[in-house]
Image (cartoon, grey):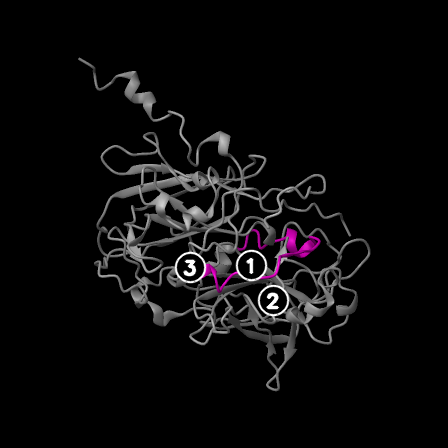
Amino acid sequence: MTSIESPDLETRNAAPREDNQDLALFGQTPSQTVGPFFHYGLPWKGGADLVGQSDMGARPELFAEEHWVLNLSSPTGTPEGEVIEIAGRVIDGAGNPVPDAMIEIWQANAAGRYRSEDDPREDVPLDPHFVGFGRASTDREGVYRFRTVRPGRVAGPGNSLQAPHLAVSVFGRGILKRLATRLYFEGAEGNDSDPVLGSVPEERRQTLIARRQDNGDWWLDLVLRGENETVFFDL
Amino acid sequence: MSDIIPYARDDAGAPPSRFADYRSTLLRSPDQPLVRVPQTLTEVTGPTGMWGRLMGPAVADLTTQHGGAPQGQRIIVSGRVLDEAGRPVPETVIEIWQANAAGRYVHSHDVWDAPLDPNFTGAGRVVTDAEGRYRFVTVRPGAYPWGNHKNAWRPAHIHLSLLGRAFATRLVTQMYFPDDPLIEIDPIANAVPMPYRQRMVSRFDIATSQPNWALGYLFDVVLKGQQQTPFEDDHDEH
């Protein structure tokens, strides 16, 4: 009779197999789509409002109120700089809006400093009221919208200075891995000498440059595929 | 300015953007090749230490968010967040979301005829500790049908979202369960070539399980690492 305290049973769980704990497979965890149902898990209320406290970025109509479990950002005050709204439409390869995408932004403050332990430039001031990370769901018309401050210029390679920009990530059903791009501002100082914009073929650079609307908003469509396809980066 | 130490690019386990068996990729993947750009301060920084301020307090136990206990098999999911050199990634946020035990999401666009559970939302977030460790308590999600092809079923999975230290390390993935026969016929999991697909399959672990309470699963997440030397272009994806 085998005892249930048998060492065989105790050690069986450690048998080699191809899975997450297999050292032979160790490496980057592969990316997968966010799918269509992320709205109650990822975009928090105010995630798209980097300046004040609002519901921007969330889609509360997509699930019952008792399922708001991750729900509110906590701004501490008003950041320095010019407050701007940035919006645009996410468009698929058939020209249709994408109503279930999620957009994230990462940007420097108005002085050009990142709120990050990895930005060592102590000569550029931090803003206690500005983080610079935002997240927005697209709405039923495929439109994303952020309220933020216009970023300052950030140092680039060598002695260069980058033009004002936001780093942008696109997620969605059918998007197996994050699409990374940038948003620049039409007419901004430095656009002509920006090292990243300069790496993009000239005829496609306009897909990264937001334009000012009559109402003051900055607008940039994100075209996933096809005509006027947005330039996405291999970082 | 100080020198930038760039992060690695995708390794051989990264899925392509376009994968015909997963139909939604056809109109939502770029037609043009990705454009290689230099990494700058923008790409190697991220909102470290700001998670609570951005997203609110941690939610590590998904089984105690409502009036009673949710239906289903209670499980513990734990592991570490590491970089490619095996170093822990501390103080980084992990967000999860999932279907309930019947395979139903609380989302209004999920119209599958499986019961909602009034005691289960299925969303949580934690920040890793100094050793990169994290731990969630939840229920095992059910499989569910989807419209990708005839008789298509998603294997049981938990969605995970991580930011890491930098814009360059952003990752959204899915964790699968061992011995699930649906994995090998799932177009989303199989967008990742073998054997790398198996990196997304958690391991049942008796030591993580708690007697008379919950089954335990181990799942480590490996984020892109910083290179000390310029990265070699040996993993082009196209």
Image quadrant occupied by the N terminus of chain A: top left
Q: Which residues are magenta?
A: B23-50
Which label was assigned to residue A210? Answer: none
The CA span between labels 1 and 2 is: 10 Å
Q: Amino acid at mark 3?
A: Arg
Which residue position holds label 2? A230
Asked whether, in this view, residue B185 is left or right of residue B165, the answer is: left
Q: Residue furthest right?
A: A159
Is residue B31 inside the magenta stretch?
Answer: yes
Q: Is residue A173 visible?
A: no
Q: Residue furthest bottom?
A: A214
User: What chain letter is assigned to the residue under label 3?
Assistant: B
Task: Give SS at disc 3.
Answer: helix
On residue B23, which mark appears? Answer: 3
Give me the disc on residue A179.
1
Task: Identify the chain of the residue marked 2, using the numbered disc in the image.
Answer: A
Q: Amino acid at mark 2?
A: Thr
- Where's residue A200, x and y in %? 71, 62
